[in-house]
Image (tube, rainbow, N blue to C red):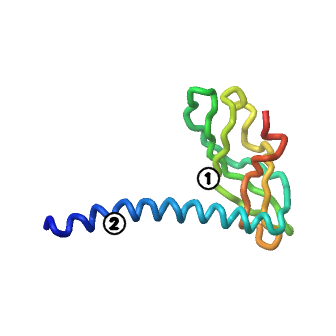
């Protein structure tokens, strides 16, 4: 058994590092796809779940939002947005958040964190 333990010790970290790399590559591919032909719109918050605040007064909220493109309603869930704790009461169901999506396929969308309305 001990002659095979080095294989387990080598494979586990490699799988962990590989999964992290795949996770970041998926996000980067989404970024590149949207960057090709972006459309900026406002989406409405359908549901949100606030997390616990950190030491700096920031809190992560997981939101579900809907938007309309080509007369079809698209819904995207579990998107994270970091806000100030004092702004928690401003983020409510029905509030509009800026998003950007790929013109040819609106399923590729994300929160536009560079929009002025999200900056303090």
Q: Where on the picture, by quarter, is residue 26?
A: bottom right
Quarter of the image for the C terminus: give it: top right
Q: In this view, which residue lies farthest toward the left?
A: 1
Residue 96 vertical placement versus 76 (above, below): above
Residue 90 vertical placement versus 15 (above, below): above
Q: Where on the picture, by quarter, is residue 100?
A: bottom right
Residue behind mark 1: 78
Location of residue 34 in the rendering, given as x and y in whole percent from the top left corner:
76, 65
Q: Classify mark 2: helix, strand or loop.
A: helix
Q: 30 or 79, which lies in front?
A: 30
Location of residue 105 in the rendering, given as x and y in whole percent from the top left corner:
77, 71
Residue behind mark 2: 11
Classed neighbour count for the residue bearing mark 1: other residues with Cα under 10 Å, few (<14), some (14–19), many (≥20) = few
Classed neighbour count for the residue bearing mark 2: other residues with Cα under 10 Å, few (<14), some (14–19), many (≥20) = few
Quarter of the image for the N terminus: give it: bottom left
Give me the residue at 72% from left, 56% from top: 110
Location of residue 63 in the rendering, given as x and y in whole percent from the top left corner:
66, 47
Give me the residue at 47% from left, 63% from top: 19
Q: Could you tell which of marks 2 and 1 lies nearer the N-terminus?
A: 2
Please give left or right for residue 36 compared with residue 46 in the image: right
Q: How many marks?
A: 2
Q: 27 or 63, which lies in front?
A: 27
């Amino acid at each position: 058994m001990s002659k095979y333990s080095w294989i387990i010790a080598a494979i586990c970290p490699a799988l962990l590092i590989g999964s992290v790399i795949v996770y970041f590559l998926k996000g980067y591919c989404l970024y590149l796809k949207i960057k090709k032909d972006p459309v900026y719109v406002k989406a409405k918050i359908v549901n949100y779940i606030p997390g616990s605040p950190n030491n700096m007064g920031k809190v992560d909220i997981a939101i579900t939002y809907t938007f309309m493109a080509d007369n079809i309603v698209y819904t995207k869930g579990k998107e994270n947005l970091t806000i100030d704790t004092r702004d928690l009461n401003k983020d409510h169901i029905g509030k509009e958040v800026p998003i950007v999506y790929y013109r040819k396929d609106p399923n590729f969308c994300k929160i536009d964190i560079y929009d002025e309305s999200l900056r303090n």
